[in-house]
Image: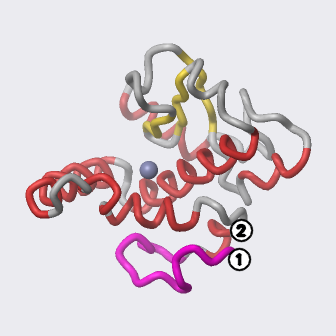
Amino acid sequence: MIFFIFFSSFFIPDEKRCLHGVPEEGSGTDLDGGEGMKVLRNTILPVEGFVAINLFGVAFVRKGSWDSLSGEQKEKMLRHEAIHTAQMKELFFFGFYVAYFFEWLFRLVLDNGNAYRNLSFEKEAYRNEGDPLYLEKRRHFAQWRKPLRAPGSVR
Ligand SMILES: [Zn+2]
């Protein structure tokens, strides 16, 4: 099963739109730049209080909290998750979860209370989630490199 999920994520077609939830009009098609996210809208994952989680390249979004987002917020969130997918592929998925977990543990001890936001994986995703073209210019292992431009600047 795990291997099925693992391999299938390489073969998910690059949809030029997302499958559920995101309005198709407007800039909805800018979502991917070739990194379309498969979206599964459901009532179980992620746990309450969270809106989306990326498991092996598939975005699980929580009904209700997801539905209350604007189209723009959804796009941003899916771009964020697509950045995580790019990080995962480079680390063969399991490496991502291992590195993510240990970095989180490490920061939990060192960074009082900001472990999640300070994770290198999250910093890259939050910094670039507003840029529809980011994945086209992303360098490998960008989460561990210095950002190319100042945080907050767009395009
Ligand atoms: Zn994230």
How many C-alpha atoms fall within 10 Å of the one at disc 1: few (<14), some, or many (≥20)? Answer: few
Mark 2, residue position: 133
User: Which region is colored magenta?
Assistant: 139-155
Residue furthest to the front? 112
Quadrant location, the N terminus: top left
Mark 1, residue position: 155
Residue 9 on image: x %, y %: 53, 41
Residue behind label 2 places its C-beta within 8 angstroms of ligand 1: no
* Element at label 2: loop
What residue do we see at 39% from left, 81% from top? 145
In the figure, 139 relative to 107: above or below? Answer: below
* Element at label 1: loop
- Residue toward you, 5 or 110: 110
**Along the horizontal axis of the image, is 37 left or right of 57?**
right
The amino acid sitting under disc 1 is: Arg
Q: Quadrant of residue 42?
A: top right
What residue do we see at 85% from left, 52% from top? 27
- Residue toward you, 115 or 91: 115
Residue 138 on image: x %, y %: 57, 73
What residue do we see at 90% from left, 47% from top? 26
